[in-house]
Image (tube, coloured by chain):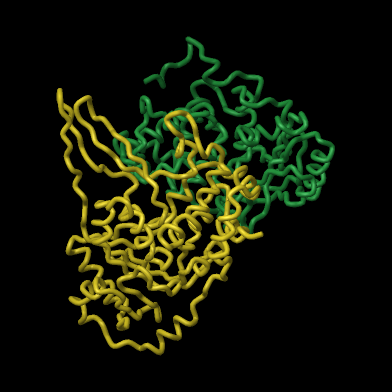
Amino acid sequence: MDELRRFARELLLKKEVAAVIGYEQVGEARTRPVVITDPDECRRLVLNEYCLNNLVVYLNRARIKALARSKEGIRKLAVVAKPCDIRSIVALIQENQIRRENLMILSMNCHGVVRDFGCEFNGDNLAAKCISCNTQSSTYADKSFGEVREIPKFTGKLEYDLSEIEQLPPSKRMEFFREQFDKCIKCYACRAVCPLCYCQRCITDKTIPRWIESSSHSRGNFAWNIVRALHLSGRCTGCGECERACPMDIPLSLLNRKMAMKSKELFGYESGKSTDNPTLVGSYDQKDSDELFM
Amino acid sequence: MTEEKLILKEDLLRICDDVIKKGDTLLAPGKSEYVIVKDVSEIKLDPEALPTKISFKSYVFPKSEPVLYYKRSKNDVTLIDADVNGRKIVVLGAKPCDTGSIDIMKDLFNWDYRDEFFNLRAKHFIMIGMMCKTHDEYCFCTSVGCSPVSENGSDLFLIPLSDKEFALRIVTEKGREFIEPYFRFLCDADTKRTEEVLSAAKNPETAFDPDEVHEWLGRNFESPKWDGIGEVCLSCAQCAFACPVCHCFDIVDEDYSYSEGRRMKNWDGCQFGHFTLHASGHNPRDIQSKRYRQRINHKFRYYVDKFGKILCTGCGRCSRGCPVSIDIKEIVSNCKD
């Protein structure tokens, strides 16, 4: 952690980056994203099991982008990212949203994170995405911090099992998701925290014509949640932030994971793996399977 | 003076059972929200539970509701009133930081226009509050004029004396009317014990003085403090929708077809970028820092100026649930020179 603080401070002092986006500790079991431009403030940076946010979301924010434009011609931003978050960076580079040369990736050698703030870090409270994680450190980062330790063995219980839901007959599956989506209050926290949801103007905010009903009734909720899942299919890197942010506990990652599985099965594509490949949609081939066409 | 009685938990549950059997709606705090109780065995009545993730607001001010239906013909438009559902709703075991929420919102919904939807629902609410015996780092009810033992907004108020018995205070006439048919379940109060329990309440530490905050906000519309928050906030509406008193809404028309449709009233949130977007394309709150400033000013200055009430109950839901851990208590506490 001290190494990260020193390194980040140097970056700002030497004016290599315009800002450092990292985590600061707030309370015992919680961190908060922090945008640092003053080198001395780097002492606030932390790296631990409570670094839940995917900070890559900030790279596409107008206010943050403006920092890298206005300050003395410094184009680079430094971002603290877990190896799984780095997959979102790769996806954004593939989609021409950010440039690698304008980024300083400070990676954290990760041994898992908690499922939510306030939990004690142990096998019971391991985040779902960490259960079968096999990328504890990243080779794509500019520098990695912290030691690689073993991820605790998951001893908790997941509330929903994707394979069980897959096995339900279509009508039951529909019923399950309708019930879940009915809970949605359209706060759009899922959209706000998603690094891949970067549209300047989301389709749900368009009013002429209105494609997605803004009302939070069954139909409006269903439309929004399905559009969200479809727009992220072949793109979602599985950071799980949408599900964590949801105040109504909707298991959003079930759909995301299913879409990721389909992308792999049908097209051999995994989002966020490599900047050498075009995106899934960008690599459309007439010989592609049409199983998913509606 | 408030009348006090003693009631056994099992008798309280008998009353609840009767409410359900009569077909009235019984709401109680569930895992993450207030839920409609179908069977009394689901009732927890845990004074040590933290506030649910969202309040019971949607039962008095639904997240989405039709306000009228319309039909178009060649030269005419016919309007049809929407039915307002004014069923009796009994809220059992509401936290003191929730019980007062309807009274706070009532001022807005009766200000320049009497919102019959809100009023009719509010009229049919029976609020059974319960003393709160816990708090976490996000709670700050005592800073906004509320407290773990506040009866404000409650028709009846429960004070847990043990696992099996409660002191029951009859706070309003509405509460008396509700409990009168069940008087046989009530015994004489043991006020000494009640006082002991009440005085042992765990008050969250006072974090700020709302008068000082009000005064500071008046002088610091352009403070650079807002900028820092604007950088981190991601502009969702978790805070507004989880809030027991945030009440902004949007009116939209939904066409079923060319000739028919309905007008909807939907929750809206001031942190959304398009909340203040004008038809001209101009947006007076074009960046996040201005939007967050609005949120704090509305709660601690504008609403106070207009209605003499703070638009906040100190429940801490917005902070607890914020995806980027923005803590309203911390921000308001820093509203000083």
Left or right of A242 on screen, residue B44: left
Decide which of A70, A200 is in the foreground and name it. Answer: A70
Quadrant in the picture for the C terminus of chain B:
bottom right
Q: Is residue B127 left or right of residue B302?
A: left
- Horizontal and vertical percent for residue B99? 37, 65
Chain B, chosen colour in render: yellow
Residue at 41% from the left image edge and 21% from the top image edge = A292
- The colour of chain A is green
| Horizontal arrangement in the rendering, residue B157 relative to residue A53 (left or right) | left
Identify the residue at horizontal 40%, vertical 57% (top origin): B55
Residue B5 visible: yes
Give percent across and percent down for residue B138: 54, 61
User: Percent x, y for residue A164?
Assistant: 40, 41
- Please determine whether, in this image, residue B248 is positioned above or below residue B123: above
Residue A21, located in which quarter of the rendered image?
Answer: top right
Q: In this view, does A100 lie above or below B269?
A: above
Q: Which of B122 and A22 is in front in this view?
A: B122
Is residue B32 visible in the rendered structure shown here? no
Residue positioned 56% across, 67% down in the render: B209
Percent position of residue B134, x then y: 49, 70
Name which quarter of the figure residue A218 lies in. Answer: top left
* Residue A279 figure quarter: top right
